[in-house]
């Protein structure tokens, strides 16, 4: 298995938010983590990304134990609900931001950035500031900014919840298309059953920190 969580737990004070969670995902599949607010799905995502340390258990990607690694050393990228884009940078600067940590020269990074913007039909907006583009366009920028660093696992935390219904459906299709085309291993967090059904190769249902069902 490409991504493995083995008996992972996390508590905040007395409250155990994730309880002894084990799941695995083959390479190139999309797993939807489905459940109501507060069921532990975002906490699980943050433990995979390293933004939260697991209290116990193991997390492996491609056979390597990443449980103790800092977030920036993990082969993982995250698309947040809020997109977390830099308002003082252009669209292109946002997209290529992560490449400077990989030692990629500016000229090469800009070329790569334009290639990735083409994937989501956004190349003509390369010089725009983030405030000048719509919510759906910001979502696309956040997606390719995460893809460009070629992560082994891409994590998405309810990334479509700020969009209107029509745009959500369109973005769902786009994400699925990109995921299939580039065979990206993805974990997608949602509380929307329909979204999980449309997107997921597998759906894992969580309730009160436990994995109830996967299939």
Image: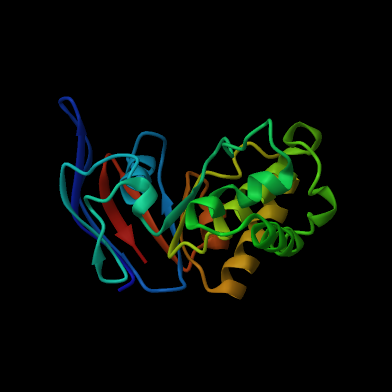
Any part of residue 168 in sight: no
Residue 138 position in % (x across, y down): 70, 42
Q: Is residue 76 left or right of residue 52?
A: right
Above or below residue 201? Residue 8 is above
Residue 60 position in % (x across, y down): 26, 63
Q: Residue at x 77, y 38 (%)?
A: 134
Colour mode of the rendering: rainbow
Quadrant in the rendering for residue 32: bottom left
Q: Nearer the viewer, residue 132 or 10?
A: 132
Residue 47 position in % (x across, y down): 30, 46
Q: Nearer the viewer, residue 41 or 76?
A: 76
**Most extreme residue toward the top, as rendered?**
13
Q: Is residue 47 left or right of residue 56?
A: right
Q: Residue at x 41, y 39 (%)?
A: 36
Q: Residue at x 81, y 34 (%)?
A: 132
Q: Quadrant of the C terminus?
A: bottom left
Above or below residue 180? Residue 203 is above
Q: Is residue 133 left or right of residue 97?
A: right
Q: Quadrant of the N terminus?
A: bottom left
Q: Residue at x 65, y 44 (%)?
A: 94
How many dots with numbers?
A: 0
Any part of residue 74 in sight: yes
Quadrant in the rendering for residue 153: bottom left
């Amino acid at each position: 298995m490409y991504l493995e969580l083995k008996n992972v737990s996390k508590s905040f004070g007395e409250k155990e938010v994730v309880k002894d969670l084990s799941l695995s995902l083959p390479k190139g599949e999309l797993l939807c983590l489905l459940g109501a607010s507060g069921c532990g799905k975002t906490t699980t995502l943050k433990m995979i990304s390293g933004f939260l340390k697991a209290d116990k258990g193991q997390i492996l990607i491609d056979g390597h134990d990443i449980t103790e690694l800092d977030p920036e050393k993990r082969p993982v990228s995250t698309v947040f609900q809020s997109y977390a884009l830099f308002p003082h940078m252009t669209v292109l600067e946002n997209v290529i931001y992560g490449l400077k940590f990989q030692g990629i020269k500016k000229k090469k990074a800009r070329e790569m950035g334009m290639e990735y913007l083409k994937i989501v039909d956004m190349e003509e907006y390369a010089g725009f500031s983030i405030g000048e583009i719509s919510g759906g366009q910001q979502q696309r920028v956040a997606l390719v900014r995460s893809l460009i660093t070629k992560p082994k696992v891409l994590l998405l935390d309810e990334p479509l919840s700020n969009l209107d219904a029509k745009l959500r459906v369109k973005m769902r299709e786009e994400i699925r298309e990109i995921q299939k085309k580039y065979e990206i291993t993805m974990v997608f967090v949602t509380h929307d059953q329909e979204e999980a059904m449309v997107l997921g190769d597998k759906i894992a249902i969580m309730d009160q920190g436990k994995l109830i069902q996967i299939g």
